[in-house]
Each structure stands twice: as C-alpha cells, then as structure tokens.
Image (spheres, rainbow, N blue to C red):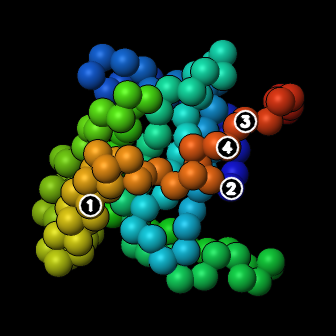
Amino acid sequence: MMESELHVARPVRVRGNIIANNGYLAIWFVFRNKWYDIGKFYDRKRRWIGYYCDIVNPVGKLLSIPSRTSVITDLFLDLWITPRQECYILDVGELQAALTRNHISRPMAQKARKQITNLIRLVRQGRFPPKAVRVAKPLAVSKRWP
C-alpha cells in the first residue's frame, strides 16, 4: 500500500465528474499475481470518490528484496468504480493506439479486455474490490513537503 497526493496536468473527468486533480489523494494497492492494481481516490477534502483500477500484467514478486523494485506493466485499459458501484471502462483509445503501434500484442490486449470484464462482474457481485482496499483510510495527518 502506498499513499500519494496527485499532481496532474489537467483534471481527469469521468461522466463530467472530476476524479483526479491536483491535491487529490490516492491510496494504491498492488497485489501479487493479479491483473490489476487499485487506487482508492479522495478529493481535496479527503472525501472518498471512487476506485481507479489499472489493468496490469500480473506481478509475480512484490519487493521481495528491499534493494530492488517490482516492475508493473500497464496494459492500457482502466476501470473507474464509483461509490455507487457504477463501472466505467477508461482508455479504450489508448489500448487501440498501443495495438496500432505494436506496444502490446493482440493476445495481451484480449487478456486485458477479459480481465476488465471480469472485474466488472466481480463488482456487480459485490466481491470487488478486496476488503483490505475497502477499509483502508488515508493518514490522519498529511505532511506537505516544500
């Protein structure tokens, strides 16, 4: 789990609602052998506004050696989940552009599409996101660095 304040070039919107802007907060979760990571997003007043899920190539080892890093490969498709459990698939155009530029193979793009469909099914069944994500809260005191 990692908490970070967001810094974006311009506000990110889904269906007219701002989901990411400067000063917003995200608590990120990366899971071993899962096709997703999850950001639990909060606005500037630290009100929870939803979950942002990147579809990623599964990571086999997470920081298994403290002096190393884990590589996370984004597969371009993303999912926004509102507090009302509404799901919106994001960045379909990015996936298509990546296919056109050969940045992702057709089989991997198909896996990404399959995984996002699976996440939506799990949301509708009330089985996603995992409990550890649902219960996480931002730090009580946020430090601002100069």
- Report if residue 49 is visible in the image: yes
Q: Which residue is mark 3?
A: 138
Between discs 1 and 2, the one toward the N terminus: 2
Residue 82 on image: x %, y %: 39, 31
Between discs 2 and 4, the one toward the N terminus: 2
Horizontally, residue 7 falls left or right of residue 13, namely: right
Q: Secondary structure at mark 1?
A: helix
Q: CA distance from mark 4 to mark 1?
A: 23 Å
Between discs 3 and 2, the one toward the N terminus: 2
Q: CA distance from mark 1 to mark 3?
A: 28 Å
Q: Which residue is mark 4?
A: 136
The mark closer to the camera, 1 or 3, is: 1
Residue 4 on image: x %, y %: 68, 41
* Disc number for residue 1: 2
18 is higher (above) or lower (below) than 103: above
Callout 3 amino acid: Pro
Residue 22 falls in which quadrant of the image? top right
For this orientation, the residue located farthest to the front is: 125
Q: Residue at x 86, y 29 (%)?
A: 141
* Disc number for residue 118: 1
Instruction: Verify CB contact (< 8 Å) between mark 2 and mark 4.
Output: yes
89 is higher (above) or lower (below) than 8: below
Horizontally, residue 71 falls left or right of residue 119, namely: right
Residue 29 falls in which quadrant of the image? bottom right
Q: Using a 10 Å C-alpha cutoff, classify the residue at mark 3 as few (fewer than 14 neighbours), some (14 to 19) or many (20 or more).
A: some
Instruction: Verify CB contact (< 8 Å) between mark 4 and mark 1.
Output: no
Q: Using a 10 Å C-alpha cutoff, classify the residue at mark 2 as few (fewer than 14 neighbours), some (14 to 19) or many (20 or more).
A: few
Q: Secondary structure at mark 4?
A: loop
Q: CA distance from mark 1 to mark 2?
A: 23 Å
Residue 111 on image: x %, y %: 23, 71
Callout 4 amino acid: Ala
